[in-house]
Each structure stands twice: as C-alpha cells, then as structure tokens.
Image (cartoon, helix red, strand yellow):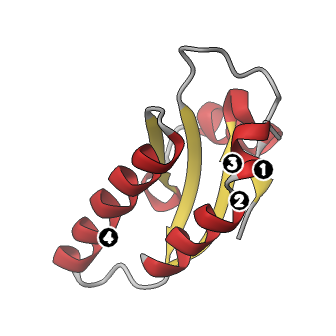
Amino acid sequence: MENLISDHLKEIKGLFKKYDVKEAYLFGSAAKNNLTEDSDIDFLINFSDHKDFEKYGNNYFDLLYALQDLLKRDVDLVAEETLSNPYLIESINQSKIQLL
C-alpha cells in the first residue's frame, strides 16, 4: 500500500464511516505500490444502504469529492454492485486490499 494511503488511512476510514460505507477496498496501482505522479486512486466500495437513491447519490459524490480533497489526487470510486464485467472483477480482486 502506498504511503499516500497509509499516511491518511485514519482520515480515509473516517470518511467511509461518515458516508455510510460498509466495506471498502483499495485496488489498482496504489494497492500494488505502482503509483505515479499521474495515477488516480482506486477504491471499491459497498454502501450500507443503497435503497434511497437520493441519499446514495449524495453519499457517493460527497465521498468522492472528500477523498479527492484529502488525497489531492483524482479518485476512481467504484460501487461494487455496479460491476458486471468478469475480467474487470477478476483484475480488481487480484490487487484489492481491504480498508474497511
């Protein structure tokens, strides 16, 4: 796991809890310690309650912007229930690190 993530892990977990995330994983280059200057940070998440679409949307975008502000990087926030491509799922599963 990259220093950028480990240095901010407490704050990242706090944001996940604030925005009702029940599970969160780091994946991609930050999980593989291959982060470059131009790399974004990839998170795979599951929200506690996604039945209220307005709350879901607000939590998703508020969390996305809060993570970008904290990490000073572009963030790719992937909700696990939106994944359907088996090759992408396998690729994510190979590198993911559970954060919450």
Q: Which residue is mark 2?
A: 9
Whether the residues at callouts 3 and 1 have beta carbons within 8 Å, the answer is: no
Q: Earlier in the sequence, mark 3 or mark 4?
A: 3
Q: Which residue is mark 1?
A: 6
Residue 26: mark in rendering: 3
Examine the rendering and report whether any part of residue 1 can be seen. yes
Front tag of 4 and 1: 1
Q: Quadrant of the C terminus?
A: bottom right
Vertical side of 88 occupied by 51: above or below: below
- Horizontal and vertical percent position of residue 70: 49, 50
The amino acid pointed to by label 4 is: Asn
Find the distance from the CA under tag 3 to the CA under tag 4: 18 Å
Mark 2 Cα-neighbour bin, 10 Å: few <14, some 14–19, many ≥20: few
Whether the residues at callouts 1 and 2 have beta carbons within 8 Å, the answer is: yes
Q: Which residue is mark 4?
A: 59
Whether the residues at callouts 4 and 2 have beta carbons within 8 Å, the answer is: no
Q: Earlier in the sequence, mark 3 or mark 1?
A: 1
The amino acid pointed to by label 1 is: Ser
- Horizontal and vertical percent position of residue 97: 80, 51
Q: Would you say 47 lies left or right of 28 here?
A: left
Q: Would you say 8 lies left or right of 98 here?
A: left
